[in-house]
Amino acid sequence: MRAVENRLQMLRDEQTHTMPDNAEAVATIGRLMGEADLAAFEKSYRAALERVARYYAELFTQGETLGSGEGNLVFTGSDDDPETLETLTAMGFADASKAIQTVRKWHYGSYAATRTSAARAHLTELLPALLLTLGRAGNADEALSRMDDFLSRLPAGVQLFALLRNHAQLRTLLVQFMASAPRMAEAVIHRAHVMDGLIDPAFANDVTHREVLVAKVDAFLADARSYEELIDRARIIGQEQKFMVAAGLLSGTVSAQGAGEQFTALAETLLNRLFTKVQDEFAVRHGRIEGAEAALLAFGKMASREMTFTSDLDFILLYDAPDTESDGERQLSTPHYFARLTQRLVAAVSAPTAEGVLYEADMRLRPSGNSGPLATSLAGFRAYHKDNAWTWEHLALSRARVIAATGALGNKVDSEIAEVMSRPRDNAKTIDDVISMRALMARERKPRHAFDLKLVSGGLVDLEFMAQSAQLVAGAQLALPQETTARVLAGLGETGLVPQGQRLAEIHGVYSTALQVMSSALVSPFKEEAWTPTFKELLAHLSNYPDFGRLELDIAQMRGEVEAAMSQWYGKARAL
């Protein structure tokens, strides 16, 4: 059905979901589907419709009974029903009269989502259970207000209301989004069908296993008939799967570490597939350079498999190729060829289309930064890191990772990084550089909120600087090349270089969990108004704390522990 819908929309580049009403136009769709015979296409199409209808009917045959059991719920008429006021108050609504006004507005079809009689019929059956779920959200009035805002912007409601009627866990999850995760609520508004995946029995398996996620991405991209369609499909599956991983995180199905690994697996897979297609598409006009190899080197959260819902792609393109020209219709010299290829790859990832933006691309860590060429030769990379790189660039290199490569270039890049990391250096100067960089960052990038745990003193950046500086001055002793921050911190404890190393790794886990949840749940995580009581409760729960107050107190203590350990480490590291 998705494939037929896609062909319909290809014809006149319009968002239609309606089959043509004449045989000739239907035959055109059939030919686009690879079926030249109209009768055969109609037969297979009707068979698919009947199968979907049969599954759909079976899905809803065992839905629960939707009486509230709580008392009257009457929303007709112009006056508030006294017994309904009592029922809503008992459910947890502080302003029961306002709740009645809100629901009455839904019944009168004031919104597109409630305009059809079918949608209102589903909503009427859904209301008792929905109001009970809202009442348990912790702040029933606020949750109802957000639900009202959600419905006011939802383009259609029949499908979603039917799902919510018959699946209590889905209803609870949506109300949780309304009460504490506005980013997720926004995602449902724009793509209501993403909720379907949450009722799939395989949901937990999908969001916790890399190979399942990769297979889903590959299967969806495989149906693309053109380069432009592949670009759009990458955005569709990327946004849908980010939603699914975030839903797994916020529902407790997947851990914060697991979410980071899955967000990264998704980004890495999409970037790999686009890189392959961009190279093929680029070669159509410009040909290829014989004997050339190319690789993508990831930095930051992508390299350490700790990406969040909102992470960008931090990578550079490296190549190893003879100094010649490409063999295509429009020949390009080797440096120009790979610079243009990199531009095409960045556009494939970050250019806005009708389906939105896939990821923002950050390529500032290429040699010479934004002033340098977009693509870097292996020889240029080697020379730069030998003679010109700053200490902060070597810190970043300490966890860099090749995520795509042709030929043997991946191994060559790994060897170059290993050589840079094992190079003798002035440890005292290295640590002084690290301290100076952190002081500069503290002046120029001040924390925006008490839970800006990346930038606060004693926060994530301080833990990362400790781990990365350890890779530079004690890499041989640690023997953990290109490892994650948490693993290096634990290694510092195991070797005795930082006795508190294991504790620091645990603190890193608490910080990372908070930042993962904030990224997935909040559109503006550093605005105080976003920190509602329900979000604080959710954050505490997912961080394994009994309440937010205890989490807040412990994080303040953790920051002090990090500051003390950092001071001790830098003092010791100078003398190593």
Image (spheres, helix red, strand yellow):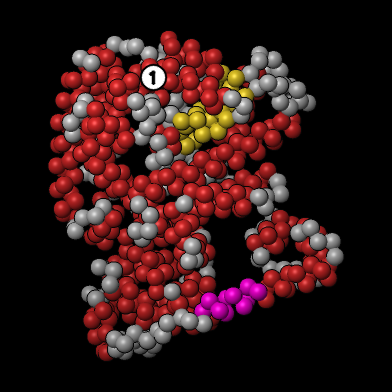
Circle 1 packing at 10 Å, graded few (<14), some (14-19), many (20+), is: many
Q: Position of residue 222 (x, y in %)?
A: 66, 50
Q: Quadrant of the C terminus?
A: top left
Side of 410 relative to 20 (left or right) = left
Q: Nearer the viewer, residue 410 or 533?
A: 410
Point 26% across, 45% down: residue? 510
Residue 94 at least partly seen: yes
Residue 441 placement: quadrant: top left
The number of callouts visible is 1
As drawn, 546 above or below 480: below
Q: Secondary structure at mark 1?
A: helix
The stretch in magenta equals: 51-60
Residue 246 placement: quadrant: bottom left
Side of 303 relative to 544 (left or right) = right
> Can residue 379 be found in the magenta stretch?
no
Predominant secondary structure, magenta span: helix
Q: Position of residue 552 (x, y in %)?
A: 18, 49
Point 71% across, 55% down: residue? 10
Side of 500 relative to 191 (left or right) = left
Q: Position of residue 349 (x, y in %)?
A: 55, 40
Residue 116 placement: quadrant: bottom right
Q: Which residue is mark 1?
A: 421
> Can residue 58 be found in the magenta stretch?
yes
Q: Amino acid at mark 1?
A: Met
As drawn, 270 above or below 91: above
Residue 123 at least partly seen: no
As drawn, 262 above or below 82: above
Point 76% across, 25% down: residue? 328
Point 57% across, 79% down: residue? 57
Q: Position of residue 17 (x, y in %)?
A: 66, 66
